[in-house]
Amino acid sequence: MNFKQVVFDKDKEIKLDIYDAESDVSLPGIVILPGGSYKTFKERDAARVALTFLTKSYQAFVVKYPVNEKKNYQDAKQSISMAFDYITDHAKDLNVDTNKLGVIGFSAGGQLAAAYSNQPDTKAKFAILGYPVLTQALDEKIGIHSEDVTKQVTKNTPPTFLFGARGDELAPYIEHIYPYTEALYKNGINFEVHEFATGGHGFSLANQFVGVVNRDRTDEHFAKWFPLCLGWLQSL
């Protein structure tokens, strides 16, 4: 594996971390948007997710969008567009199959992933949303002005995989995942959703690999979202 970082905007601290599998052939690609309420980037949603996808023969990328005092929803969205443009422009050197390039976002990153996937010019061929914040319900708490992405779904939205936990009190299913899946269904979009009876918000992969940097929060049942997701991706 080879790691490098590309800086898109030094002032806004917009960066792209590249986890290169150093493959001899083009591989599927996954662009990762960590959560963290725009305060910081949670390692549980970033490097460890990238490394896990790497073991499944994906080229992995982590977008560092503006956070903390530089946080701005529109700048964050632009960060994702910059990342996808860079990856597609350098696909040959990065050994990425752009027909199998998608996005995964966790929590606040899930909102950004959904928003990007719904853009008319999106380059994401699939979207994965983990315990996503999909409405403006947390704007005041987070300190940003976002948008209700449940209203952005169209017939051109790419296939989408969603997962969350019944006990998620920060981004409850009925306020976020449910209205989004309803919109996907009404627009005829290929989607799969898993709302687990165990686990919770911010569990990421829910295994020991992330548990050691996530207050030892693990859940064997919730962790099944990852193999289920891989199976769904293969079915596309």
Image: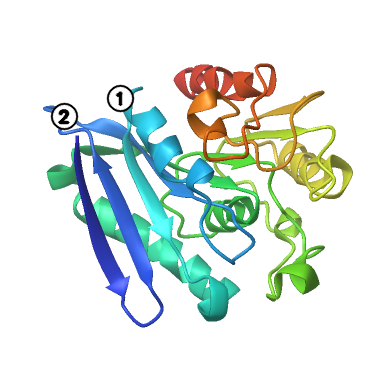
Disc 2 to disc 1: CB gap under 8 Å: yes
Does 147 appear above or below 103? below
Q: Residue at x 68, y 75 (%)?
A: 144
Query: In terms of secondary structure, where does tag 2 sit?
Result: loop
In the image, 44 versus 20, the foreground residue is 44
Q: Position of residue 28 (x, y in %)?
A: 32, 32
Labelled disc at residue 118: none
How crowded pointer 1 is (Cα within 10 Å; few <14, some 14-19, many 20+) is rated as some
Q: Position of residue 31 (x, y in %)?
A: 41, 46
Q: Which residue is mark 1?
A: 57
Check the image and report above or below for 171 versus 162. Answer: below
Question: x, y percentage for residue 162?
Answer: 66, 35
Q: Quadrant of residue 181?
A: top right
The quarter of the image holding the N terminus is: top left
Q: Residue at x 36, y 22 (%)?
A: 56
Instruction: Please state if 91 lies on the left or on the right of 35 as rendered.
Output: left
The mark found on residue 23 in the picture is: 2
Q: Is residue 33 left or right of residue 153?
A: left
The residue that appears at 86% across and 49% down in the rendered structure is 175
Give the side of residue 199 with respect to residue 124, left or right: right
Mark 2 to mark 1: distance in Å?
9 Å
Q: Is residue 109 above or below residue 14?
A: above
Q: Position of residue 64 (x, y in %)?
A: 42, 61
Instruction: Give the residue type at disc 1.
Output: Ser
Residue at (34%, 64%) from the top-left corner?
15
Which residue is at the far right? Answer: 174
